[in-house]
Every structure is written in structure tokens, then in C-alpha cells.
Image (cartoon, rainbow, N blue to C red):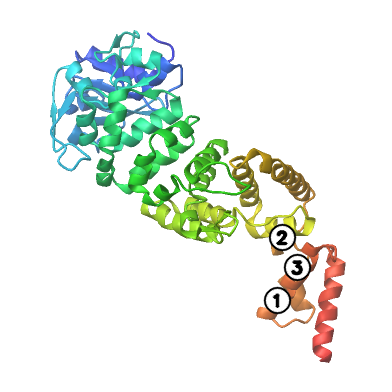
Amino acid sequence: MRPDIPFGAQHILQTLAGAGHEAYLVGGCVRDLLRGIPPHDWDICTSALPEQTQACFAGQRLVETGLKHGTVTVLADGGSYEVTTYRTEGPYSDGRRPDHVRFVPNLAVDLARRDFTMNAIAMGLDGALHDPFGGAQDIRHGTIRCVGRPDLRFQEDGLRIMRALRFSAVTGHHIEEQTARAIHDHRSMLGRVAAERIGAELRRLLVGPNVGDVLRQYPDVFYQFWPQLGPLAGLEQHGPWHCWDGWEHTVRTVEAAPADPVLRLTMLLHDVGKPLCKSTDEDGIDHFYGHPAVSAQLADEMLRALRSDNRTREQVVCLVGRHDMPLPPQDRTIRRWLGRLGQERFFQLLAVKRVDSMGRAPETAEEQLAELAEIQRMAEEIVAQGQCLTLKNLAVDGRDAIAAGIPAGPEVGQALEALLERVLDGDIPNHRETLLELIASTHDKRHDA
């Protein structure tokens, strides 16, 4: 018995075997065990029919929402385990899900319906493998290969295209030739996949360490659901700042960004508006005036199309729209933007500007990167000192303003905003006594007038 299999999974496998049924770990958990990675999910396949599985675990907590497809979820030892009857699948008329499933008594038939060889391996409690399609060898060789004919696998479920790219981006494994060709040939199948499912795979793909190679090798797949990216390919950027076309620059910035979904989505979309904003001056230098605002608008539309959650969409759109804004290393400017954006988004913006510079011509990036490092240092110092950045940090509030004689209503907010502006500019300290004196003097002047 393998010690790296959790007690809950062991209990389920032993219980099913004790009742005379076959039962194995299968799919991603086996793949991860063979790669030396702790699995997140533990799936079990069995010869037991769903009602037999229910009988085996009568009295235990079960989730039975997957019964139609042969799945019973058993809650054991603090974890949840999907237990699914061996099955084969009917045709995929809608290119998303099988029209029907049929339960079978044979493990090999069940494994044959799966997407990739590395996911078509079953493992017993003793660690013995059932691997009819050579998945373990493909894992050792770093190969992603479809089970059976790749064209049929992708015609059955177009999301498998994104899964293949995601596995490659995350693991660094290469996609074998026939599987790769089928991905290109059948990319239109993504049109049948729910937008939110594409979005979920995309976010996981983008944070993979091999994302750059995937973007370079399969740009047509990404253009399939986001055609706005297509014009970046071959977009010339003649000038001192760039030495790559629009797509290669974009890929390089995605690679350089921290492995965070918001930052990598931002870099994928930060220049999407450039093709619409291109102009060339009399010296042959290309310019892209106004492209951040156009890119932000397109990014908003594109993320909505993939049903992105609102927080991610708003963060990405904000960062895309401001990625090219001037940000000099001045205390007052840094304080203002820390106050407007908040600490998290301000430091995200610095990361975006940094990797954008890294994707440009090396000879022009050095000075920009040095300046951004200085801004980072200054901003961290401002935050560490607890300097006043917003009305919330101001040493006086609305009650103080009203007590000083300012009428309740909009004038209170206006008075506090005026004080904050002077504090941010460094004209006055954020001291309660000083601010109260200023409020009082302001009220006196208005009263005298």
C-alpha cells in the first residue's frame, strides 16, 4: 500500500474491493503521483454500479448529484472523493458532452474514453499501474498525446484543446506532432465550448512557466476565442523602443510577468488596441497614440466575453488603461497614485510597467527599469512610514469639519478633499491640530465673505 495515498482514498478502495468490486485511482491524481507532485483531487473508478457504490457506503455522507453519469462523491476523512463506474460514452453531438453514457465492466474500455494518455492510467492500492496507452512512458518523456485519434478526441470536446495547451504551459511537456496538428485543425471546436470554461483554462494556462512557448506555437487557438489578438501578429513597431512585432512583444511581457493571473492577463491584453492606433511619421517612426485607452476598452469586452469575474476584469482593465502613463519618481506623484489606486493595484502597475519595459529593445529598457526600481523603493518607504494617502488616513474627519462650523453636506467633503490635496502635495503635515486650524480659518473666511 502506497503511503502517499490519503486514508480516505485507501478506505474507499478497500471497501469496494472488500465487496467484490474492482477499484482504482485514476486520472489526474495518478498523473501527479507519477510526476512526484502532490495531487489536489483523488478520483476513483470502479466496476461497481452507482447503486452498488451507494450500498457500500450506506451510512456515510454521500453527494449523489452525478448519478446520471455514474458518479457518487464519498466524503471521507475530511476529503471528497468522486467514485465513478467504468463507462463508455456515446457520440458528442454538441461537441461538449456525450449524448449518453453506458456502464461497462471493463477497466480498459473506461480508460480508452479519456483525453490524454497521461490521464488514462489507473493505479491500485499496491501502486501497480494499468496503463494500456503508454501514459507513464509519455510522462517520463514529457509528452502530451491523445488517447487514440486526436481529431476524434477534439471533435468530442473542444475544451480538450485548451486542456492540452494548459498541460503544456504548466508542465513544460511538448505536445506530440499528431496531437498538435489536430489542435490547429480543430480549433474552431472552441466555438462550442462555454465561455467560462475557456476562461478558467486560460487563467490556469497563463500562470504556467512554459506559457511563452505555448503562445508562440498556438497563437491561432487564442485568436479563435479572442480574434482581437490576431492583428498583433506581424504588427511592425519601427522606432527606438521596440525590436519585435506586436505579438512577440506581448508574449515576452507575459513570460516576464510574475505568475499571477491578473498580471499575465494584463500583459496579454495591454497592447491589443495598438493596431487600431498605429500611425507612421515622416521619419518612418511608428506611433500608437491613445492605445492604452483603446486597449482597455477592448480588454473589457474580451473579458466580458469569457465571463470573467468582475474583480479580475476591473483590475485588468485599470492596469491596461494606465500601463503607459507617465510616473515620475516624485514623492507627491507617488503618494497621489498610491491613494487613487490603493497599495495592491499601485504595486501591480509598477510590475506591469516593469515587464512592459523588459519586452522592449534592451538598449532602451535599462534607464526605465532603473527609474521604476527607484519608484518601487520610494513607494515602499511611503507605505512603511504610514503616510496619509486617502481621506481615511486624514487626521480629521467630517465630524471635525462640522464641529468647526462647516455646514453638513457637500461642503464637508470639499473641505476634507482640499486638506488631503495639500497633505499629498507636502504643503502641510497630517497633524490634527494643524488641520483643525486650517478648517477653522477656512470657515472664518467664508463666514466673513
Whether residue 267 sits left or right of residue 130 in the image: it is right
Residue 234 position in % (x across, y down): 45, 45
- The image shows residue 8, relative to residue 357, as above or below, that is above
Residue where numbered disc 3 is placed: 421
Q: For the view shown, which residue lies furthest in the bottom direction?
A: 449
Could you tell me which residue is drawn at 25 percent across and 41 percent down? Answer: 189
Whether residue 172 sits left or right of residue 288 in the image: it is left
Viewer-proximal residue, 249 or 336?
A: 249
Dot 2 and dot 3 residues touching (CB under 8 Å): no
Q: Nearer the viewer, mark 1 or mark 2?
A: 2
Could you tell me which residue is drawn at 40 percent across and 25 percent down? Answer: 77
**Helix, strand, or loop for circle 2?**
helix
User: What's under tag 3, amino acid-wise?
Assistant: Glu
**Helix, strand, or loop for circle 3?**
helix
Q: Which labelled disc corresponds to residue 336? A: 2
Q: Earlier in the sequence, mark 1 or mark 3?
A: 1
Residue where numbered disc 1 is placed: 414
**Mark 1–mark 2 distance (CA, rounded to whole Å):** 17 Å
Q: Which labelled disc corresponds to residue 114? A: none
User: What's under tag 1, amino acid-wise?
Assistant: Gln
Q: How crowded is the residue under tag 3: few (<14 C-alpha within 10 Å), some, or many (20+)?
A: some
**Helix, strand, or loop for circle 1?**
helix
Quarter of the image with the N terminus is top left
Q: Earlier in the sequence, mark 2 or mark 3?
A: 2
Quarter of the image with the C terminus is bottom right
User: What's under tag 2, amino acid-wise?
Assistant: Arg
